[in-house]
Amino acid sequence: MADLRALFAKLGFADAKTLLNSGNLVFSADRRADAALEKLFQAETEKKFGIKAEFFVRTTQEMQAIVNANPFPKEAASDPGHLVVVFMKEPASAKDVAALAAANKGRETLRTVGKNLYVYYPDGIGDSKLKLPWIGSGRNWNTVLKLTALLS
């Protein structure tokens, strides 16, 4: 994580903070959080470390909206380790969400809100048969809350 923070400092984000060894960064930026910023981070990470990594950038307001829009508040309070937010590049289409729900053979429950998919795994993530067909990066609810707190 120290190497990742150093890379971000070199890119002009000197205040970058990481959350444990999760690969998550929080930083201030004068630029818009958009696909160009994600592509910059991806290119620089590959150049510096030889690793192809996807970046999903969200603003402070977007992270707070993710917390506020949580369609599973009861589960977030009682079982936060089994609630996951999957950050996506684009919103999933209604057709994709319907197909995913139809293919789900377990007790998992899912809802999309914008560019985020919320999935509750009541029986645990490790044994789940649910396969997410599109690219995204999932974080459990505890991590989402810790990242949001770092932004304050």
Image: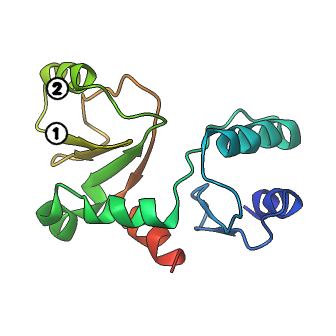
Q: Nearer the viewer, residue 101 or 123?
A: 101
Give the image quarter of residue 24: bottom right
Left or right: residue 93 versus residue 21 is left
Image quarter in which the N terminus is found: bottom right
Q: Residue at horizontal 49%, vertical 68%?
A: 147
Give the image quarter of residue 47: top right
The x, y position of residue 85, in whole percent, is: 35, 50
Per the rendering, the mark at residue 104 is 2
Dots 1 and 2: beta carbons under 8 Å? yes
Q: Give the residue type at disc 2.
A: Asn
Q: Residue furthest bottom?
A: 152
Residue 43 sits above or below residue 10 on the image: above
Assign a secondary structure to mark 2: loop
Residue 39 sits above or below residue 132 on the image: below
Q: How is the image coloured?
A: rainbow
Give the image quarter of residue 112: top left
Left or right: residue 107 versus residue 34 is left
Q: Give the residue type at disc 1.
A: Glu
Q: Residue at horizontal 16%, vertical 64%?
A: 73
Other residues around mark 1 within 10 Å, as few (<14) / some (14–19) / many (≥20): some
Q: Nearer the viewer, residue 44 or 52?
A: 44
- Give the residue at mark 1: 108
